[in-house]
Image (cartoon, rainbow, N blue to C red):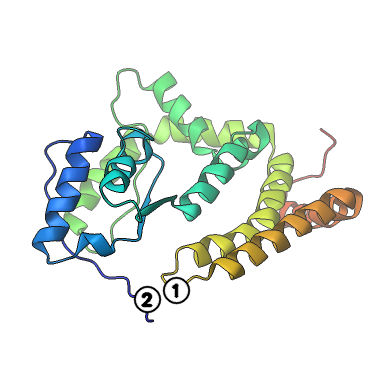
Amino acid sequence: MEIREDFLTFVPVHDVTGLGLANTLQNTLEKLGFDLNKLRGQGYDGAAAMRGSFRGVQAIIKEKYPKALYTHYVSHSLNLCLSDAAKIQDIRNAFGRTTILKNKILEIKLNVQATKLKSLGETRWVLRHKLVLLFKEFLEPFVAALEQLQTEGTHGTDLTRTNAVNISRYTYNLSQYLQKSNLDLATVLKQIETITLKFQKMRENCSAVFGDIYKEAKAIATLLNVEEKKP
């Protein structure tokens, strides 16, 4: 049996309740010629309207087609776990330095609507004029944010970022595999088990692991001319 993943169509939605979405889904699939009696699975994110046990799309579909088992997108679940882990202050600070710029903009430029710089587009040159003006407007808070970062130092941030990267290198491959159309459940479970054991070993040998992370973070700090200091 060959597994295929195909884009079908865009569908305008006017009712975003569980029942409304379920009806739209069923009607669209039937119009496209699918026999829903052969439906064997459903996959959505964790939004209440989709996963609700009683009024969610999956429940409504499953009531009519009992063999259509619901699965919360496993790759989405993994990303939610990593997102929650990133709420730890040190990790959030390591990846969220733009917050400093945003705060400086709100502090210095009162009543301003835009709070972040935008990247220059490669093709839409007409918009570059607006972006240059935006940079000019934000120049003062931009310099103030850089001065704050310089005052705070970045060594601890480098260390935290290096640790996060060291962990995410294992979860990245799993996340990529979970999004494949031909993934195999046995292989997924084996990968999860391997990553879990790897993390357990990292905890058991935390001194050695931290030593390697510290050396890598120190190398980054040296490259950026950041002096090593005790926190």
Question: Pointer 2 and pointer 1: residues touching (CB < 8 Å)?
Answer: yes
> Type of residue at label 1?
Asn
Identity of the residue furthest to the bottom in this view: 1
Q: Residue at x 37, y 41 (%)?
A: 117
Decide: few, some or many residues near mark 1? Use Cα within 10 Å; few <14, some 14-19, many ≥20. few
Q: Is residue 162 above or below residue 87?
A: below
- Residue 151 falls left or right of residue 98: right
Secondary structure type for disc 1: loop
| Residue 56 in view, yes or no | yes
- Residue 72 falls left or right of residue 221: left
> Type of residue at label 2?
Ile
Q: Relative to the observer, which residue lies in front, 207 or 203?
A: 203
Q: Relative to the observer, which residue lies in front, 38 or 217?
A: 38
Q: Residue at x 44, y 19 (%)?
A: 107
Secondary structure type for disc 2: loop
| Residue 101 drawn at (x, y percent) | 47, 33
Label count reads 2
| Residue 80 drawn at (x, y percent) | 52, 43
First along the sequence among labels 2 and 1: 2
Please name the residue that numbered disc 1 is placed on.
182
- Residue 157 falls left or right of residue 25: right
| Residue 54 drawn at (x, y percent) | 34, 32
Please name the residue that numbered disc 2 is placed on.
3
| Residue 11 drawn at (x, y percent) | 13, 52
- Residue 73 falls left or right of residue 110: right
Q: Residue at x 33, y 41 (%)?
A: 59
- Name the quarter where the N terminus is drawn: bottom left
Q: Residue at x 80, y 52 (%)?
A: 200
